[in-house]
Image (tube, helix red, strand yellow):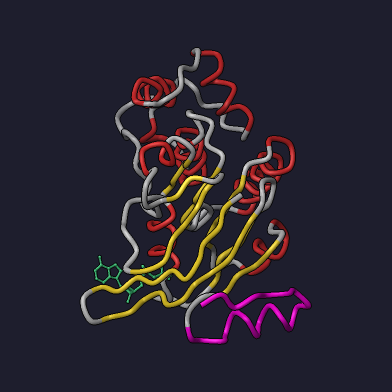
Amino acid sequence: MLEVSGLKKRYKEKTVIDQLSFQMQRGEIVGLVGENGAGKSTLLQLLATIMQPTEGDIQLDGLSYRNDRKKIRRKIGYVPQDISIWEEFTVEENMLFFEKLSWKRRSKEQCRQLCLDMQLTHWKESVQSLSGGMKRKLNLAISLLHDPMLLLLDEPTVGIDLKSKTEIGTYLHSLAKNEGKMIIYTSHDMDEITHICDHVYSIGKDPFYTELLKGKGVAVEVIA
Ligand SMILES: Nc1ncnc2c1ncn2[C@@H]1O[C@H](COP(=O)(O)OP(=O)(O)OP(=O)(O)O)[C@@H](O)[C@H]1O
């Protein structure tokens, strides 16, 4: 279970997140919406332990972010907006390189299977020659090497075609429902959010996305 209580983040004089609270259970997918600059990436970075909150606490599986950061990091997979993989390496070389840095040992076959599970079949191809969708899949596969319980994805489907989007969505759904992972992801694609997520949370002051989704009959909770 993930519990976020009274979270606040201030950059110098600017308060980006204020009094944000929510809970989620294993097996759930949460979609995070809000206008540009609403604080979605900031929230994911706080949840990924990359930044410290100004106030408030987060607990994952009974562990507090204040006291157990090292243990918590082993349970988190984080994919930032920018793709961060070795362009000049093949898919195989990337997977084997990041496996060496991972908390958990995986065989070459297991690494390959992780890619195949999301229809990433270009094992021997250089990343440079892959489409944007394939690169995003590889980034996602790398984040799963240590079998995290909480997966934080910052716009994982931005700029990719509908087929790859659908494959990633189907895969995320199976990760949550079959493996009990908790997934939080941001997107500006409201159809995708509506289709994949169990809950949609809106942050920021602009009611645009909240109204848009309510108009489609989707329940949205404003959390900050
Ligand atoms: N390291 C930082 N220092 C100062 N201000 C920051 C920092 N990171 C983000 N901000 C500011 O905090 C606000 C929220 O940024 P954030 O990237 O979290 O928003 P976002 O909702 O993810 O936006 P987008 O949809 O454009 O990705 C913005 O006004 C941004 O300029």
Vertical arrangement, residue 154 with respect to residue 180, above or below: below
In the picture provided, is 180 more to the left or to the right than 128? right
Name which residue lies at 74% across and 42% down.
177
Q: Residue furthest left?
A: 12
In the picture provided, is 51 more to the left or to the right than 62? left
Q: Residue furthest right?
A: 217
Vertical arrangement, residue 15 with respect to residue 182, above or below: below
Name which residue lies at 36% across and 35% down.
128
Residue 162 in percent (x, y) is at 63, 54
Residue 130 in percent (x, y) is at 44, 37
Name which residue lies at 36% across and 69% down.
55
214 inside magenta stretch: yes
Residue 54 in percent (x, y) is at 32, 68
Vertical arrangement, residue 82 with respect to residue 12, above or below: above
Quadrant location, ligand no. 1: bottom left
Residue 79 in percent (x, y) is at 43, 47
180 inside magenta stretch: no
Near-viewer residue (149 or 82): 149
Give the residues in magenta. Answer: 205-224
Near-viewer residue (39 or 5): 5
Q: How many marks?
A: 0
Vertical arrangement, residue 203 with respect to residue 67, above or below: below
In the picture provided, is 138 more to the left or to the right than 199? left
Near-viewer residue (14 or 119): 14
Name which residue lies at 44% across and 35% down.
74
